[in-house]
Amino acid sequence: MYDAYSMQPFSRTATPNKSIKKKNTNKQEMSTYLRFIVSRMKERAIDLNKKGKDSKHPMYRRLVHSAVDVPTIQEKVNEGKYRSYEEFKADAQLLLHNTVIFYGADSEQADIARMLYKDTCHELDELQLCKNCFYLSNARPDNWFCYPCIPNHELVWAKMKGFGFWPAKVMQKEDNQVDVRFFGHHHQRAWIPSENIQDITVNVHRLHVKRSMGWKKACDELELHQRFLREGRFWKSKNEDRGEEEAESSISSTSNEQLKVTQEPRAKKGRRNQSVEPKKEEPEPETEAVSSSQEIPTMPQPIEKVSVSTQTKKLSASSPRMLHRSTQTTSDGVCQSMCHDKYTKIFNDFKDRMKSDHKRETERVVREALEKLRSEMEEEKRQAVNKAVANMQGEMDRKCKQVKEKCKEEFVEEIKKLATQHKQLISQTKKKQWCYNCEEEAMYHCCWNTSYCSIKCQQEHWHAEHKRTCRRKR
């Protein structure tokens, strides 16, 4: 399993060494796996150096002995400098160490670095657990979960608490717990007790499962995985096929080249004993040097009658050309290897640049979409508030109008009642007689318009003025 930009050139030698090929393949695989881990590290290390590059700080060189950061680790991965996963883990631990030394153990950057190191260790553990699962879960080709791993995972029915039995792969076992990864849409991981695990050969009817849509899709994926197992269909990337084809073509072309070098002088040597006539030697056309992967077409040569001395001279002249062809093939292989390294680096730079451009463009589009959505929400909110205020104002005006009309009606009715009562009181008051002296209700009548409430008032008024104006007949 190789990445398109991580392929290293196959060393084309006269006698290829299988151990070297295996070593290069392992290094390519390791670089491919580490690229996935570095990409996750870059996503989680965005906030680690927000204040700028640490090495620019005047105290950085005094505190930090070996500087390392995520871009440095990525560059070493791209150049294939790591010889083992322990070296990669050591650089991640050195990054944590430098961050704690420079920022402090209780700083926000130290917490981010600890989380980064913890996640990196987890990714490496997952890689050591199953390389096939690690690669496929990151590369995500079609039906990636259906491809068998080497070695194959045990298939079981696993039951989580609160759920029914579900098809799953066994990742690892520890004591009485089993780490499984479920078939289905999300391919979730979980630790399941051993008593909740059943072999995949158990009949489904005995499990009493609820056959939902998700369960059926998981079973379809299980059937596809089992079919791949029966057919022996394992995941193999195009780059891996290309590497094997190049290795085989290199071996076959090198063998053919050696065979031509050894056979050609023999054929010419056998023609020495023939009786021939002397003939003037004609110059042969120069043969272009070709790489070992190309085929050298052999054209049928006409039988010429030459002398023994001329034939010997031609044989000695052709041998350096064949040797030159073999040497040129090796040099062309080295040149092609250097060109492959050059273009691999160019492709890696182009890939990183495209990723950064895509990331910036995505952030810009997301930012514009958020701003547009925010403005639309603000406009909808403003319109809703204005509509609610208008409705409330109209309702308040209607209520006020109703209250005013009701109050006016009650006021008019109250005025009418008061007027009626007032008239009644006036009428009753008019029907009574009143004391001329103290204006209290009178009981004693004196003359036509004079009455008194008591004898005292009568005597006081009589002596004061009434005896001169009284009209009572005496």
Image (spheres, helix red, strand yellow):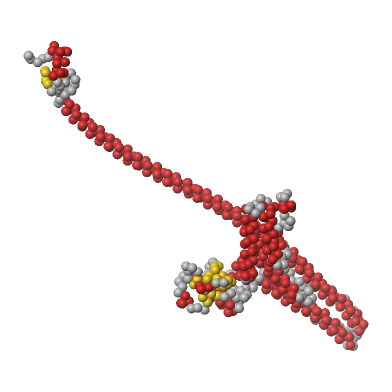
With respect to residue 413, does 323 lie above or below?
below
With respect to residue 264, does 49 lie above or below?
above
Mark yes or no: residue 157 visible: no
Q: Quadrant of the N terminus?
A: bottom right
Instruction: Provide residue 209's location: percent of width, then percent of height.
Output: 46, 73
Residue extending farthest to the front is 175
Residue name at image x 19 percent, y 20 percent = 438
Residue name at image x 74 percent, y 65 percent = 341
Residue extending farthest to the top is 468
Instruction: Provide residue 147's location: percent of width, then percent of height.
Output: 59, 73
Residue name at image x 62 percent, y 73 percent = 235
Name the foreground residue: 338 vs 460.
460
Name the foreground residue: 90 vs 403.
90
Residue extending farthest to the left is 474
Left/right of residue 128 with respect to residue 413 in the rendered view: right
Q: Quadrant of residue 400?
A: top left
Mark yes or no: residue 468 visible: yes
Instruction: Provide residue 144's location: percent of width, then percent of height.
Output: 59, 70
Left/right of residue 187 with respect to residue 454 in the rendered view: right
With respect to residue 466, does 346 lie above or below?
below
Instruction: Provide residue 117's location: percent of width, then percent of height.
Output: 64, 60
Q: Quadrant of residue 48?
A: bottom right
How many labels, in total?
Answer: 0
Residue name at image x 75 percent, y 78 percent = 252
Q: Quadrant of the C terminus?
A: top left
Left/right of residue 125 with respect to residue 250 in the rendered view: left
With respect to residue 61, does 229 lie above or below?
below
Name the foreground residue: 237 vs 33.
33
Name the foreground residue: 407 vs 365.
407
